Structures are given as structure tokens and as C-alpha cells.
Image (spheres, rainbow, N blue to C red):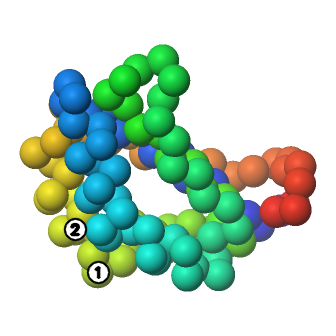
């Protein structure tokens, strides 16, 4: 299986999670929507932490998965969210071994 997965967790400052989402919408939403290499993408609010965001993406291959953080807008996105975050974002790359559903 040549697909790649990326998990990102953002810990916003108290009460700033919606602001983080607005920055994501400004920079990433259109890229994600138009990227043929991203098979699935989930932008989620953590049910157990009112200040956390969890993002998960499954890409067609390693290159497509890494392309997300290599976009020209990504540095601006990180700079703009830095003031909103309580801690550095956690990035976890993974290689799927088994996938259920249409993305398989």
C-alpha cells in the first residue's frame, strides 16, 4: 500500500479554537478541496478538549501527503496560527497498513 496518512493536533489558547479554524479556512480549505492527491481529509474539534483541533488526512501516496506542508501558503498559516496556539502543533506521519472504505 503506497498511501500516506498525516495526523495533526493543534492545541489552541483557551477560547481561540474558532479563530484557529478561521485561519485554516483562509489558507488550507481551498487547497484541500482541490487536491486530487488527498483522498480523505477530516478537520475535527476534539470532543474532550474545547481548545483542541484534530486533523487527519489520507493521501494517495507519500508525495501527496507531504505536499500539504510544502505549500507556499503553509508558512503564513503557521505564522498566523502561532499567536493562537498554546503549544506547538503535533504532526504524526503514518503509513497505512489497511484501510476500509472508498479510499482503500
Q: Which residue is mark 1?
A: 72
Task: Examine the rendered structure and indicate whether residue 50 appears above or below residue 3.
Answer: above
Residue contact at pointers 1 and 2, CB within 8 angstroms: yes
Q: Which mark is residue 5?
A: none
Q: Quadrant of residue 41?
A: bottom right
Count of numbered circles in the view: 2
Position of 35 with respect to 49 (left or right) is: right
Question: Relative to 3, is 81 above or below?
Answer: above
How busy is the neighbourhood of tag 1: few (under 14 within 10 Å), some, or many (20 plus)?
A: few
Q: Position of residue 77 (x, y in %)?
A: 24, 63
Name the residue tied to disc 2.
75
Q: Residue at x 36, y 63 (%)?
A: 25
Residue 38 on image: x %, y %: 63, 70
Whether residue 90 is visible here, answered yes or no, is yes
Residue 28 is situated, as x and y percent measured from the top left of the image, at: 39, 68
Left or right side of 96 for 15: left
Q: CA distance from mark 1 to mark 2?
A: 7 Å
Q: Secondary structure at mark 1?
A: loop
Amino acid at each position: 500500500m503506497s498511501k500516506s496518512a498525516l495526523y495533526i493536533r493543534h492545541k489552541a489558547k483557551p477560547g481561540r479554537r474558532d479563530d484557529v479554524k478561521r485561519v485554516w479556512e483562509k489558507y488550507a480549505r481551498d487547497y484541500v478541496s482541490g487536491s486530487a492527491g488527498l483522498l480523505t481529509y477530516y478537520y475535527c474539534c476534539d470532543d474532550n478538549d474545547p481548545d483542541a483541533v484534530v486533523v487527519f488526512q489520507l493521501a494517495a501516496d507519500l508525495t501527496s501527503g507531504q505536499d500539504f506542508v510544502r505549500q507556499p501558503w503553509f508558512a503564513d498559516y503557521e505564522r498566523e496560527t502561532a499567536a493562537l496556539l498554546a503549544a506547538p502543533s503535533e504532526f504524526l506521519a503514518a503509513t497505512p497498513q489497511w484501510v476500509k472504505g472508498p479510499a482503500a
